[in-house]
Image (cartoon, rainbow, N blue to C red):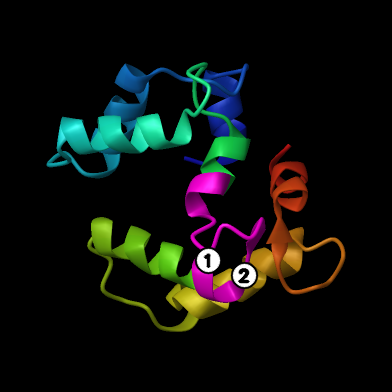
Amino acid sequence: MCYEGFIEMYPTGQLGQKTFTSICKTFDPDTDEQICGNVFNRMDKNSDGTRLESIFDFWDISEDGQLDQNELGCLISAMYDRARIKDRHGDNDPDERAKEIIKKLDINHDKKISKEEFIQGYV
């Protein structure tokens, strides 16, 4: 689901745990609802529904306020694993996709995406 489609369906940028679980199950019907709940609770820090800020924080494994190519490449690989995508060559190479995403969103050209760049890139 792309950002534009998400905002069309959820104009406030928020969704509840039940909807989040439903979206997860769209991508993988075998997804455990408890795991979805745990992920939702990790992202919904202020209990008002998930937001881009929370998603960024969830993806920022190093907790340095930046998404670098390694973090983004690992995230893309994990998404491929969940979607059972085997072809990771050419346009599907996680590191190449990470480079392209960073190139598009990196306003200050430091080869990382800050939370502000992430949000601005999707608004």
Answer few, some or many: residues within 10 Å of disc 1's Cα (few below 14, many 20 plus, some between 14 and 19).
many
Say which residue label 1 marks: 72
Q: Position of residue 51 (x, y in %)?
A: 57, 30
Give the magenta-colored segment's residue range.
57-72
- Which residue shows up at 53% across the image and 22% down it? 46
Q: State whether residue 31 appears in this view.
A: yes
Check the image and report above or below for 122 versus 117.
above
| Residue displayed at 41% across by 17% down | 16
In this image, 97 relative to 113: left or right? left
- Observer-nearest of 107 and 23: 107
Give the percent coordinates (x, y) of residue 71: 51, 68
| Element marked by disc 1 | helix
Count of marks overlaid on the render: 2
Q: Amino acid at mark 2?
A: Asp
Q: From the top left corner, tell me how far across and down residue 93 is, in percent.
A: 45, 78
Is 60 covered by the magenta stretch?
Answer: yes
Q: Write the residue at 21% across / 44% down.
A: 28
Q: Is residue 62 left or right of residue 104?
A: left
Q: Helix, strand or loop at disc 2? A: loop
Residue 97, located in which quarter of the rendered image? Answer: bottom right
41 sits to left or right of 14: left
- Which residue is the site of mark 2? 68
